[in-house]
Amino acid sequence: MKSIKVTDVGQIKNELNKYRRGRKLEIRQFNQAARLAWLGKVTMMPLDPEDPEVQSFLMYIDYPDGLSARLLNIDDDLVGRIFILDGEQAGYMAEIVEQGVRERAALYEDLDRRDFYFGKFYRPGADEEEVGG
């Protein structure tokens, strides 16, 4: 069995702390990820749920599909990857995911209640003209 000698424990701790803090996405990347988050294409989970001091999150960004894949301009290096996102941006991203779910659900609820037939075939005032004419 091969072993790896640890020569600098401080350097290893510094690297571990970098991962625990996570990193911020650039503005362009954050906006693109947020668009996909609104569409439900982002999955997030705490980096270390057992440690209350770790605020960063793992974030997976899935590929857009259908119409969104054709219309959204998303960098190829952003999708299909897992990021360790810092706590601040992770909080904002979670809010965007929640907002997207609420707004998409409202669209589907409105669509379910909409009466297309009535709107196309009933014209206010048309009945009154026939009765009065």
Image (cartoon, helix red, strand yellow):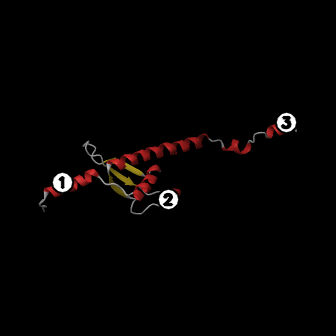
Amino acid carrying mark 1 in the image: Lys
Mark 3 surroundings within 10 Å by alpha-carbon count, few (fewer than 14), some (14 through 19), many (20 or more): few
Q: Which mark is residue 72?
A: 2
Look at 49% across and 42% down and name the residue there.
102
Q: Residue beneath label 3, please?
A: 131
Residue 18 occupies quadrant: bottom left
Amino acid carrying mark 3 in the image: Val
Residue 87 appears left or right of 97: left
- Dot 2 or dot 3, earlier in sequence: 2
Mark 2 surroundings within 10 Å by alpha-carbon count, few (fewer than 14), some (14 through 19), many (20 or more): few
- Please, which residue is most extreme toward the right here? 133
Q: Position of residue 81 (x, y in %)?
A: 36, 58
Q: Could you say which is closer to the camera, residue 112 or residue 50? A: 50
- Which quadrant is home to the C terminus? top right
Helix, strand or loop status at disc 2: loop
Residue 76 appears left or right of 114: left
